[in-house]
């Protein structure tokens, strides 16, 4: 009986190691409370309007290349919703009452309000990045990561980004 348990544990360990050695997917899945979902690769992301910005990570300045998170969401049909004195309160900027949950390959997650990420609305500058200092991300960091240019520390700048899910917290 003990030998079966040991064999099963070895099988689980080997299976987990095999999954860890698999290359990271070359796309990001974007889904949730959006009109459309998609798996986006670097070509699609670059077409949304790539930008290069200065990003300080662990006290070192870098040039990071990527696309703003708000452009990704807008590409998939996100709108903040109407605003004005004639719009019922429950409908005013309903899109800005949503959050984005970013998930890394290892399961680590970071959460952003959609409003904080939208240029002209919030102070956040969040890039879905694929290059740092003119080079593609290392396999330990990429192929994609979030670079949160406005955070004082990097805990939400997650490596090996795999999924962005928009969640309507009003529901």
Image (tube, rainbow, N blue to C red):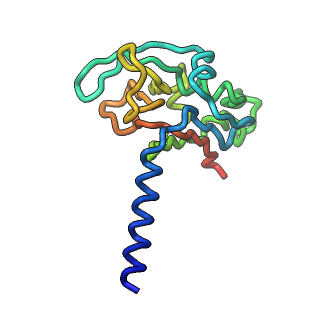
**Residue 105 drawn above or below residue 122:** below
Tell me where residue 83 appears, x and y as whole percent: 69, 28
Choose top left, top right, bottom left or bottom right for residue 91.
top right
Residue 93 shows up from this direction:
yes
Left or right of 98 on screen, residue 37? right
Q: Residue furthest bottom?
A: 1
Choose top left, top right, bottom left or bottom right for residue 10.
bottom left
Choose top left, top right, bottom left or bottom right for residue 148.
top left
Compare residues 80 and 4 and report the one nearer the observer. 4
Tell me where residue 63 appears, x and y as whole percent: 36, 15
Residue plotted at (41% across, 37% down): 158
Q: Residue furthest left?
A: 59
Residue plotted at (62% across, 17% down): 48
Residue plotted at (53% across, 20% down): 67
Tell me where residue 166 appears, x and y as whole percent: 61, 41
**Quarter placement of the N terminus:** bottom left
**Residue 2 drawn above or below residue 91:** below
Residue 108 shows up from this direction:
no
Residue plotted at (30% across, 34% down): 153
Tell me where residue 70 appears, x and y as whole percent: 58, 26
Please count the marks in the image: 0
Compare residues 118 and 94 and report the one nearer the observer. 118
Left or right of 143 on screen, residue 154? left
Compare residues 28 and 60 and report the one nearer the observer. 28
């Amino acid at each position: 009986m003990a030998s079966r348990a040991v064999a099963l544990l070895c099988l689980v360990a080997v299976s987990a190691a095999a999954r860890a050695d698999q290359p990271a997917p070359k796309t990001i899945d974007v889904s949730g409370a959006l009109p459309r979902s998609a798996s986006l690769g670097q070509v699609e992301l670059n077409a949304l309007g790539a930008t290069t910005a200065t990003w300080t990570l662990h006290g070192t300045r870098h040039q990071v290349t990527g696309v703003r998170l708000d452009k990704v969401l807008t590409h998939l049909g996100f709108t903040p919703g109407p605003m004005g004195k004639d719009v019922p309160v429950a409908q005013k900027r309903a899109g800005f009452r949503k959050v984005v949950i970013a998930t890394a390959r290892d399961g680590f997650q970071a959460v952003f309000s959609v409003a904080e990420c939208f240029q002209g609305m919030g102070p956040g500058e969040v890039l879905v990045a694929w290059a740092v200092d003119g080079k593609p991300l290392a396999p330990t960091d990429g192929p994609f990561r979030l670079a949160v240019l406005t955070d004082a520390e990097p805990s939400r700048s997650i490596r090996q980004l795999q999924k962005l899910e928009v969640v309507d917290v009003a529901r």
